[in-house]
Image (tube, helix red, strand yellow):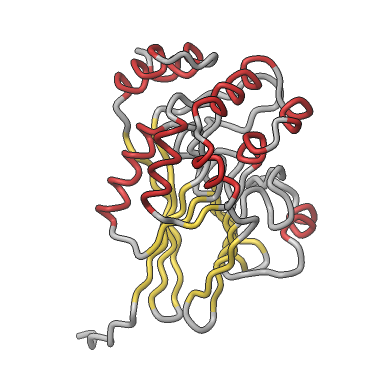
Amino acid sequence: MFALARMDARRRIALISDIHGNAIALRAVLRSIEREGVDEIVCLGDVATLGVGPSEVVDTLRELGCRCIVGNHDDYLLDPRLVDSHCEGTISEAIAWGREQLSNDQMEFLSRFEAGITLSLGTRHRLMLYHGSPSSNTVDLLADTPAAEFDQQLGPDRATVMAGGHTHIQMLRQHRGSLVINPGSVGAPFLEFPVGGRPTILGHAEYATVDVVGESVAVGLHRVALDRTELASAARASSNPMGAELAAPYLP
């Protein structure tokens, strides 16, 4: 017979990222997180561009009161000059459309996003959070990124768990003792990392959880089913320049 061990205090943190104006997916993810039961939610950035519900997404995050990290697309909303050097075509038009949907108060909320966050996980561990990498919100860290590049991009300050979004691809990679994770994308998960051309969008939503019990740490990657009919209808009804493109992944 196994003796029952004393139950140490548990802490569970949910990580959401790359919502990209998809309010329907965000609501579904938050329902899943509520069922899971968490102590804290942190958003890793890219909240309001491209999708058809930027205002609702921003209001939802404000109501949650969760800490948020600034992503490159949040920077695009705050500084339109950045868009010309990074985006073109309907993507640029959709960013401009999203900016028009947001009030001054909502834009001011975006301006308070943090560059990065480090949380203590008990007495021995830390959780380091960023968008692309600890030093940049435009760096792509992938499962097959060479170890030397990982070292360079993660920098010398390492934590037990290091988490960022940006690539829209869920990942759990052990690198030199750190668990490096990507929670994936709430609003537009990618089938694979695009190399030229547009990515293929998957029909679910994604997020991650980090669990701490005593000195033990665990990471969970979650996929949430979505109402594809609702998503397609919302995209087709929107005046967003990318409406038809946004509807396509959810059509039969």
- In the image, 219 versus 239, the foreground residue is 239
Residue drawn at (61%, 66%) of the image: 178
Residue drawn at (47%, 31%) of the image: 54
Residue 177 placement, left or right of 248: right
Q: Quadrant of the C terminus?
A: top left
Residue drawn at (71%, 28%) of the image: 83
Q: Can you tell which quarter of the image residue 98 is in?
A: top right
Question: Is residue 79 positioned above or below 137 on the image?
Answer: above
Residue drawn at (44%, 19%) of the image: 249
Coordinates of residue 3 in the picture (x, y in percent): 23, 88
- In the image, 53 versus 209, the foreground residue is 53
Residue 168 placement, left or right of 220: right
Coordinates of residue 4 in the picture (x, y in percent): 23, 85
Question: Is residue 178 positioned above or below 184 on the image?
Answer: below
Residue most toward the front? 104
Q: Quadrant of the N terminus?
A: bottom left
Coordinates of residue 221 in the picture (x, y in percent): 43, 50
Coordinates of residue 186 in the picture (x, y in percent): 45, 39
Q: Can you tell which quarter of the image residue 117 is in?
A: bottom right
Residue 208 placement, left or right of 178: left
- In the image, 54 versus 176, the foreground residue is 54
